[in-house]
Image: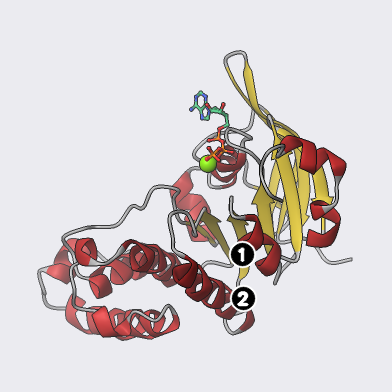
Amino acid sequence: MTTPLLSLDEATIKFGGLTAVNKVSFDIERGDLFGLIGPNGAGKTTCFNLITGVYKPTSGKILFKGSEIGGTPPNRIAEKGICRTFQNIRLFPSLSVVENVMVGAFLRHKTNIFSAFLYLPGAIRETEQFRAQAMALLEVVDLADVALARAADLPYGKQRRLEIARAMATQPDLLLLDEPAAGMNPQEKEELHLVVRRIRDEFQKTVLLIEHDMRFVMGLCEKIVVLDHGEEIAAGPPEAIRNDPKVIEAYLGEAV
Ligand SMILES: Nc1ncnc2c1ncn2[C@@H]1O[C@H](COP(=O)(O)OP(=O)(O)OP(=O)(O)O)[C@@H](O)[C@H]1O
Ligand SMILES: [Mg+2]
């Protein structure tokens, strides 16, 4: 048996009296397109915060490539190969689209981003390399034609894809996407679906995504874990999840 890329083993975090994530366990294998779903406040983003070191688990383990990472600082976890996007878009609004992606590469290579943007000697060649790589990633997310636009001027759906390109620039093994389709129109969702598939199929990335849109998540992910009130209530392939009475109850009133 191969070691899973990521394992949560009874991961738990308490905030005062609230157990936001309670003994959650699941394994993500390399190449998985994995969905994490659940109603509002279920503990999904908190799971991401545990995996990325924003919070230290109160108990339980988080293993990445077989090593415990629970409580490791976020920058160290990023270096180990986990990168995320956020529920609320976090871009550098006044930088250009391509520069936003280059920021990801600088983080990876520890180049002094200020010397690079000031075009100090020595940083120029590396900067040009990063620019070329960033342009290649913009092709993947279909934003190459707006590379020089200000990030803030992009429509919402494109900003979300830009965040994904920036995360990809850190060359992660595991990409965490927190509600990447939120607020998108149907056409933007379709484009996003293709982008995420390409990232997995062509770049061999492993993807864990949080999503509220059931159609989107069921059509994209091959394995799904469902949280409700911090507890794992179901896990399995989309067909099983869709028909699980516990899931239907948790989403009562919502179309699953
Ligand atoms: N730093 C914190 N301090 C206290 N409570 C927190 C903290 N972070 C999260 N929580 C609580 O933990 C619970 C889970 O929150 P979380 O953001 O993980 O939910 P979610 O599943 O991502 O929901 P949504 O779909 O609305 O984004 C909520 O009750 C939230 O208020
Ligand atoms: Mg959330």
Residue 24: quadrant of the picture:
top right
Q: Position of residue 134 (x, y in %)?
A: 34, 79
Instruction: Identify the residue shown where x is 41% and y is 68%.
Output: 161
Give the SS element for disc 1: strand
- Toward the top, the furthest residue is 17
Label 1 Cα neighbours within 10 Å, binned few <14 / some 14-19 / many ≥20: many
Instruction: Identify the residue shown where x is 60% and y is 42%.
Output: 44
Give the SS element for disc 2: helix
Q: Which residue is mark 1?
A: 207
Q: Position of residue 22 (x, y in %)?
A: 72, 30
Q: Earlier along the polypeptide chain: callout 1 or callout 2?
A: 2
Query: Which of 146/66 is in front?
Result: 146
Tell me if the residue at label 1 has its CB under 8 Å from ligand 2: no
Instruction: Identify the residue shown where x is 74% and y is 49%.
Output: 225
Q: Could one spot residue 74 in this view of the protein?
A: yes
Label 2 Cα neighbours within 10 Å, binned few <14 / some 14-19 / many ≥20: some
In the image, taking residue 214 as reference, residue 77 lies left or right, namely left
Residue 226: quadrant of the picture:
top right
Q: Position of residue 242 (x, y in %)?
A: 79, 54
Residue 110: quadrant of the picture:
bottom left
Q: Could one spot residue 126 in this view of the protein?
A: no
In the image, taking residue 233 as reference, residue 18 lies left or right, namely left
Q: Which residue is mark 2?
A: 200
Callout 1–callout 2 Cβ contact below 8 Å = yes
Q: Which image quarter is the N terminus in?
A: bottom right
* Marks 1/2: CA–CA distance: 7 Å
In the image, taking residue 196 as reference, residue 148 lies left or right, namely left
| Three-letter amino acid code of the residue under disc 1 | Val
**Number of numbered discs visible in the structure rendering:** 2
Q: Position of residue 86 (x, y in %)?
A: 44, 50
